[in-house]
Amino acid sequence: MIVSSGVYAIIFAAIAAAALLPFIVGKLTKRQEPGFWQYSFVLLVVLLPFNWYTPTIIDVDGTGQIDRRVVLFPSKDYKLGRYNYINNMGPDSLVFEYVMYGSVDEGETPDKALILPGELYRADVVAIDYLFVDAPQSIRIKGNGAIKTRLYRYDGTLHDDESPLSDEEGPLPCEESGESGE
């Protein structure tokens, strides 16, 4: 089941309110029912992992509009996990890349991915940091380095080193990882 990000926010808020309701009622009435802590705790414990493992689908069309949807239950095309699915519905190809700041081992990140029109790509990240905007040359970080992600329209060159993609580097489709999302 796939819902819009607005509907997902309402569902998430309703479950959180249901988890906190016994606590609020107990404080207002100065009377606490036995077991209300367990009820609230169980709902919150269920709520957090549910939120962490619901992937987002980013639909990109040819007009520059981005629509975000959330996968609530797994299906044939969408598995549960910490992913972003990029659905390229427009006529232009897209590039998904990792941007590294500071001292980061380049072996830690996969290569860039070219997403052709009509393709669905699974990015193994929780959030895409730069959607159709240039990544800054530097950022403020704590520690030695940081890895950010970027999605942009492919215009024949890659924006970091201005070298063209070769024909061998094609799209990286949603691959089965052998993990069960159920």
Image: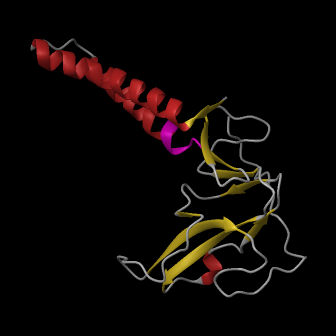
Is residue 34 among the parts visible in the rendering?
yes
Residue 96: percent from left, percent from top = 68, 66
Q: Does the magenta-highlighted stretch encompass residue 176?
A: no
117 left or right of 148 in image? right
Is residue 72 among the parts visible in the rendering?
no
Residue 55: percent from left, percent from top = 60, 45
- Which corner quadrant of the image does residue 40 belong to? top left
Q: Nearer the viewer, residue 54 or 38?
A: 54
Q: Does the magenta-highlighted stretch encompass residue 52?
A: yes
Q: Residue furthest left?
A: 30
Look at the picture and state if 129 lies above or below 20.
below
Q: How many marks?
A: 0
Q: Residue furthest front?
A: 63
For the N terminus, the image quarter is top right
Look at the picture and state if 33 lies above or below 69.
above
The residue located at (57%, 41%) in the rendering is 54
State which region is magenta.
50-55
Q: Nearer the viewer, residue 53 or 86?
A: 86
The residue located at (56%, 68%) in the rendering is 133
121 left or right of 129 in image? right
For the C terminus, the image quarter is top right
Residue 172: percent from left, percent from top = 80, 63
Residue 34: percent from left, percent from top = 23, 13
101 left or right of 36 in image? right
The residue located at (17%, 14%) in the rendering is 32
- Which corner quadrant of the image does residue 158 belong to? bottom right
Look at the picture and state if 129 lies above or below 101.
above
